[in-house]
């Protein structure tokens, strides 16, 4: 109830988040980013390069976004592993505060190092300029305003406005059952967290020439979205449903190739809306666009200035993989796993722990 998401989404989020936070996985990420490590009196030394030592960067402030359950916990964990002091601007669900309390019960020495508070904008303002690093999630405009409050020496680790997309190659549509499996996985990517956050599915492209048409794929996807409304009812309120209904009515008026929606506009899938129309960014809403090749998808993403965090693929031809490069995606994954990045994945193209340390004595 505190998160504002359906129970099924919360359970999935907790499994994905806390299931990944295991000591061996954390240590593997640290070794991968900082090298083979020996822990020496509160700092680490890279094996084979004894002159270079990594020390804690200092105080780290983390500003959570309102999307994605527990988004601040992973950077907080790695900042603590770097022996930094951490303050998190918590979401209204107080999840980080609850996590830190549990952490302190198990590791009392961290009680003074990890804290979480809620505050709104500049009210009850915490001076972010006092931190050595600030991790911030939010819109590009919010991050720009936040940057003006920092000292020049403060390291800003920013995660701005991004989206995720999906591409279904014709080879992956060899049968109805194959298309059904992709549609089911895509529905999960779309529905989780009410389509909020950079890891939700916001744009979907289906290649022509497969055994299953784009229109049929949209029907399969809509059927999965309909089932999802039963398993995990939409958390968004009446206003969002009204906006979905308006988008549905507009698509119907334009005589789109296909319009699929629930009786109360609980979801919406539209086939081939105008190319000039950007994604709607509404919960449980997707445009399914038919394309002849990945270049058409790349042109759409470029036209609407969609910076991608991840690209879900079904069918990995060389030109399809090139789409991920052109779109600047940090991750390429199968459908159904957009919302479950590995712990070591470079979220936003940034490392997990390397930005929370400072190296001393390494001239290279």
Image (cartoon, rainbow, N blue to C red):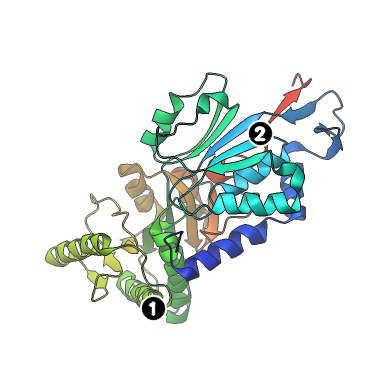
Q: Residue 282: percent from the left, percent from the top?
A: 31, 57
Residue 321 shows up from this direction:
yes
**Where residue 314 sits: x, y (%)?**
49, 64
Q: Residues at badges 2 and 1 in contact (C-beta under 8 Å)?
A: no
Residue on which the image places disc 1: 230
Quarter of the rendering containing residue 57 = top right
Label whose residue precedes the other's in the sequence (2 or 1): 1
* Figure quadrant of the N terminus: bottom left
Q: Give the residue drawn at x 51%, y 46%.
A: 90
Relative horizontal placement of residue 345, taking residue 91 as reference (left or right): right
Front position in the image: 33 or 213: 33
Residue 87's place in the image compared with 206, above or below, is: above
Q: Residue at x 58, y 30 (%)?
A: 133
- Tell me if residue 41 comes above or below residue 240 in the rendering: above
x, y (%) of residue 200?
Answer: 44, 57
Q: Classify 10 Å Cα crowding around label 1: few (below 14), some (14-19), many (20 and above).
A: few
Q: Residue at x 69, y 51 (%)?
A: 103
Quick one: label 2, few (<14), some, or many (20+) residues within 10 Å? many
The residue lying toward the viewer, choosing from 69 and 316, is 69
The front one of 278 and 141 is 141
Q: Which residue lies under the disc numbered 2?
A: 356
Q: Position of residue 24 (x, y in %)?
A: 77, 54
Question: Marks 2 and 1, Cα distance to the nearest angstrom?
Answer: 43 Å
261 relative to 344 in the view: left or right: left
The secondary element bearing badge 1 is classed as helix
Asked whether the viewer can see residue 169, the reply is no
């Amino acid at each position: 109830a505190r998160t504002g998401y359906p129970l099924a989404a919360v359970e999935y989020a907790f499994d994905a988040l806390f299931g990944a936070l295991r000591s061996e996985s954390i240590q593997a990420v640290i070794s991968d980013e900082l090298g083979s490590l020996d822990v020496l009196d509160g700092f680490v030394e890279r094996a084979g390069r004894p002159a270079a030592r990594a020390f804690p960067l200092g105080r780290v402030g983390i500003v959570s976004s309102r999307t994605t359950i527990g988004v601040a916990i992973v950077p907080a964990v790695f900042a603590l592993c770097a022996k930094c002091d951490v303050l998190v601007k918590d979401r209204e669900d107080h999840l980080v505060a609850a996590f830190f309390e549990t952490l302190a019960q198990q590791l009392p020495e961290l009680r003074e190092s990890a804290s979480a508070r809620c505050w709104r904008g500049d009210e009850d303002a915490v001076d972010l300029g006092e931190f050595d690093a600030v991790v911030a999630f939010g819109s590009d405009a919010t991050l720009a305003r936040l940057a003006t409050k920092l000292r020049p020496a403060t390291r800003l680790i920013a995660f701005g406005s991004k989206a995720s997309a999906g591409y279904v190659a014709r080879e992956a549509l060899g049968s109805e059952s194959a298309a059904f499996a992709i549609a089911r996985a895509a529905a999960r990517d779309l529905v989780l967290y009410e389509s909020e956050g950079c890891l939700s599915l916001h744009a979907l492209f289906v290649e022509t020439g497969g055994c299953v048409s784009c229109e049929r794929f949209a029907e399969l996807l809509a059927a999965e979205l309909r089932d999802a409304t039963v398993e995990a009812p939409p958390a968004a309120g009446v206003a969002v449903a009204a906006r979905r209904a308006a988008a549905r009515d507009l698509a119907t008026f334009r005589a789109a190739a296909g319009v699929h929606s629930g009786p109360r506009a609980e979801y919406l899938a539209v086939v081939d809306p105008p190319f000039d129309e950007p994604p709607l960014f509404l919960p449980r809403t997707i445009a399914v666009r038919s394309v002849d090749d990945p270049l058409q998808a790349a042109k759409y993403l470029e036209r609407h200035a969609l910076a991608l965090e991840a690209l879900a693929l079904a069918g990995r031809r060389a030109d399809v993989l090139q789409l991920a490069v052109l779109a600047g995606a940090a991750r390429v994954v199968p459908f159904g796993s957009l919302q479950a990045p590995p712990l070591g994945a470079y979220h936003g193209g940034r490392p997990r722990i390397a930005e929370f340390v400072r190296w001393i004595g390494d001239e290279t």
